[in-house]
Amino acid sequence: MNPSSQLQSAAAALARAGRVVCLTGAGVSAESGIATFRDAQTGLWAKFDPQELASQEGFARNPGLVWRWYMDRLHWVEEAQPNAGHYALAELERIAPDFTLVTQNVDNLHERAGSVNVVHLHGSIARFRCNRCAKQHALQPAEREADLPPRCAVCQGLVRPDVVWFGEMLPQAMVARAWQAAEAADVALIVGTSGVVYPAAQLPYVAQNGGAFVIDINPEASGLSTMADVHLAGPSGEISPRLVAAVQNARTA
Ligand code: OAD
């Protein structure tokens, strides 16, 4: 199939779908200037491996380094604006009868673009909690600039971002919502994920086993592009708006 007929077949499946589950990853926010995890890193953090920083071991080894990395990422997220890909997915939610957006991203760009039914599998970079007793912590302006993480007001443990690190459990209520949506989906739309981090990467397979048509949007081919019925090769900010426009056309035709 040529790229244009692939787009049309993806749009036809979405236009027919009652229930859509969408799985997004760091690639969706790349065009907003937020670095992905596995594409080449740029700038200050180029020499650090995010997988080393996003872990309990990394935090124990060097809490200051991990804190500074997350404070920088928080700053980038706050400065960033949603891009055309985020807006297209919010539009798709308005068109589809039932739409669940499951994201691995810890930014809030989907919500800022207008998405409503959003499931965050990996937590939020703008929330904080104690690494020891889990009490929520309200971040103070001076703490953003500090070289070390703040201490918990209750137990004096170190405060950390409320995100899921490697080797940690995902929030079970979020996993349950995501799995329900995948099992019931007519179409699974995957956007901007390398599909190498589990259990999130399993979601398209859960949907496919339940009979869903699977569409992958990614400039690079991944394992998920291979299992998908259609791989739309290109950046989310270009492909997603074209796809959603084609869905709108198909629904009014
Ligand atoms: P990755 O960095 O692993 O993958 C980003 C994917 O986005 C790659 O497949 C790129 O080809 C693709 N990509 C890059 N630019 C794109 C664009 N403009 N449009 C569409 N796709 C683009 O990020 P994730 O798959 O999200 O977990 O990584 C999954 C998880 O691993 C993250 O949530 C994080 C990380 O470690 C935790 O922190 C627990």
Image: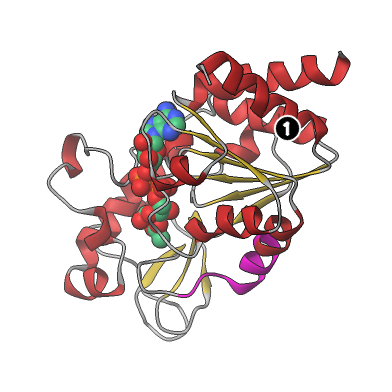
Q: Which residue is mark 1?
A: 13
User: Which image quadrant for residue 160?
Assistant: bottom left
Please name the residue shown 74% across and 22% down the image: 247
Residue 58 vs residue 188, the one in the foreground: 188
Q: Amino acid at mark 1?
A: Ala
In this rendering, position of residue 173 left or right of residue 50: right
Quadrant including the C terminus? top right
Q: Respond yes or no on whether mark 1 lies under 8 Å from ligand 1.
A: no
Can residue 143 be seen here? The reply is no
Please name the residue shown 45% across and 40% down the image: 225
Q: Is residue 137 above or below residue 135?
A: above
Is residue 36 rendered magenta in the image? no
- Give the colour scheme of this rendering: secondary structure
Q: Position of residue 245 (x, y in %)?
A: 70, 16
User: Which image quadrant for residue 57?
Assistant: bottom left
What range of the chain is rendered magenta?
169-178
Label 1 crowd bin: few (<14), some (14–19), many (20+), radius 10 Å:
some
Which quadrant of the frame does ligand 1 lie within?
A: top left
Q: Position of residue 171 (x, y in %)?
A: 57, 70
Q: Would you say the magenta stretch is mainly helix, strand or loop?
A: helix
Q: Position of residue 172 (x, y in %)?
A: 61, 73
In this rendering, position of residue 241 left or right of residue 14: left
